[in-house]
Amino acid sequence: MVERLLLAAAADASATWHSPSSSDVRVAVVLVAATLLYLAYNLLIAPRVVARLFPRRATNESDLRTTGSFFRKGAGAILFGVIPAAAMALAWPGGLAACGLTFAEAPRSLLYALGFIALMLPLLVFQARKPSFRLHYPEVRRPLTGRTALWNTLAWAAYLSGYELFFRGILVLALAPLVGPLPALTLALMAYVFVHLGRYAGETVGTLFTGTLFGVVALDTGSILMPFLAHFGVALLADFLAARPVSADA
């Protein structure tokens, strides 16, 4: 009796199994590669690793945190941007345009980005008064003037271009034709929220809103330009507002 049930279950499983299509394989490759890249990124930016890579900075917490910030952004630009972009350009149907690296909807993307930044500005001003916010921002623990401000701006630009390619370009735009827009958007949102766990509480909760909005706009415009510009603008504003002396908030 048991043997017959097992044979019947095996027959049913065999009947429903089908060889994976090329689309299935591409989806699996993207998800596995994204997981490995993000794992490599987290291992690389671990505080102990950064301290070992930059031993001269390890004796001063502010110097180590500043160096770690630049190192983290550089590592993210390579692991989230350069490596995936090269792979997609070489092997993905449609190349980089399929990942949203296009300016086809630049005016509309710019308008959306400006609207988002304007919406976020009052919230950032309010949050920047809180000590809990200032514990996390700015990541660079040097006065944001002159060369430091320039390097901070360039580091954010490099990091967020790769970041948006990773989360909105690949996980949303590249996968949407294969799994459908809504599943791709949901998958990217889950990943986006999970990677913010442990960050500033307001930022983590806000990813539900920003992750959804950025994904929807990326699908609407076919570009990652708006998410990049919006994310970049908010990051610089958060650094600037948090870097002001506390007395200036009164």
Image (spheres, rainbow, N blue to C red):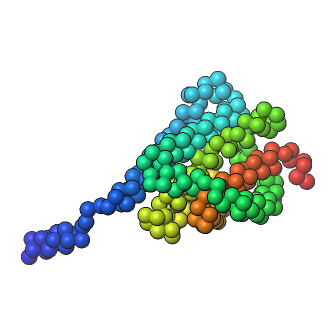
Q: Which quarter of the picture shows residue 54?
A: top right
Foreground of the two, 159 or 96:
96
Residue 166: percent from left, percent from top: 54, 51
Is residue 154 among what the camera can see?
A: yes
Left/right placement of residue 124 relative to residue 68 reads right
State the residue in front, 146 or 41. Answer: 146
The residue located at (44%, 52%) in the rendering is 92
Identified at 25% across, 66% down, the residue is 18
Please state, as top left, top right, bottom left or bottom right, where the C terminus lies in the image.
bottom right
Name, please, the residue furthest toward the top. Answer: 56
Does residue 65 lie above or below 242 as drawn? Answer: above
Among the 4 quarters of the image, the one containing residue 121: bottom right
Count of number-bearing discs: 0
Residue pictured at 49% horizontal, 58% vertical: 174
The image quarter in which residue 10 lies: bottom left
Please indicate whether residue 243 sits to the left or right of residue 217 in the image.
right
Q: Quadrant of the N terminus?
A: bottom left
Q: In the rendering, at what x and y percent does residue 4 appear?
A: 9, 74
Report if residue 215 is visible in the image.
Answer: no
Relative to 34, does residue 73 appear above or below in the rendering?
A: above
Q: Position of residue 91 (x, y in %)?
A: 42, 48
Residue 11 position within the rendered picture, expressed as x and y whole percent measured from the top left? 16, 71
For this rendering, which residue is in front, 76 or 60? 76
| Left or right for 181, reference 117 | left
Residue 39 as seen in the image, left or right of residue 134: left
Residue under the image location 69 percent in, 60 percent down: 109
For the residue pair 28 and 137, the one nearer the viewer reads as: 28
